[in-house]
Image (tube, helix red, strand yellow):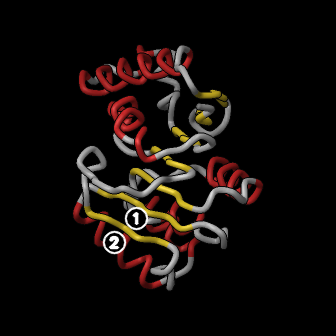
Amino acid sequence: MNIDELKQTALKDKIPIMSDEVIAFILSFLKNNSQIKEVLEIGSAYGYSALCFSEVKHIHIDTLEIDKKRYLKALGNIELMNKKDAIDIYFQDALSFKTHKIYDLIIVDGAKSQYQHFFEYYQDNTHRGSFFIFDNLNFHGMVKDPSLTHNRHTKGLIKRLQQFNNYLLNIKNYNVQIYKELGDGLAILERII
């Protein structure tokens, strides 16, 4: 299996994966920031994005997945593509994962309603100059226009994302860049203190 076949499998199985545009943006970001060596990804799914990012030779990725079937699929894909040296995957809830490792970049693409909790939980695992990347801040346009859904659960998720978007505007000790038109909305936070 190659990366394109994995992408098609994930799409066929209706597994949410990062858009081509966001993958390309993060790959460029990684290549242009050689000080980024240790990366944590929250939300592995089938391992697609971690495998894409592993083409950048100077990084190592820890990735977390809470769903057992997705975890096993990702583990198999990492082994199949001979990336066990570049990627460590953990079957773990991101809000109970314990590590003393300090990360240069934390990519958050897990449960959207937990974005602020993820950010706060991993503060001690960053340093001045570390980055966070949050994907899907627009949630298919619903953050701006909640009338696009009538699902109660989705409305709750959208409300949490709206709150997180507002939180980003007032955050201390970070430079925040928001790219509303990139993919489904993306934010990069750089820790400055």
Amino acid bearing label 1? Tyr
95 vs 117: above or below: below
Q: Which residue is drawn at 36% across and 22% down?
A: 160
Q: Which of 164 and 180 is in front in this view?
A: 164
Up-down relation of residue 184 to residue 87 (above or below): above
- Residue underneath mark 1: 46
- Among the 4 quarters of the image, the one containing residue 2: bottom right
Q: Which residue is drawn at 49% across and 45% down?
A: 126
Q: Of helix, strand and loop, which one carries label 1?
A: loop
Give residue 76's quadrant in the image.
Answer: bottom left
> Label 2 near label 1: C-beta < 8 Å?
yes
Q: How crowded is mark 2: few (under 14 residues within 10 Å), some or many (20 or more)?
A: some
Alpha carbons under labels 1 and 2: distance apart? 6 Å
Residue 149 at x, y percent in the picture: 37, 22
Identify the residue shown where x is 52% and y is 57%: 39
Q: Return the residue nearer the eye: 182 or 124.
A: 124
Q: Is residue 147 left or right of residue 82?
A: left
Residue beneath label 2, please? 73
The C terminus: image quadrant: top right
User: As shown in the figure, which amino acid type bears the numbered disc 2?
Assistant: Lys
Q: Where is residue 41 in the image (x, y as percent from the top left)?
A: 45, 54
Q: Establish if 77 lies above or below 177.
A: below
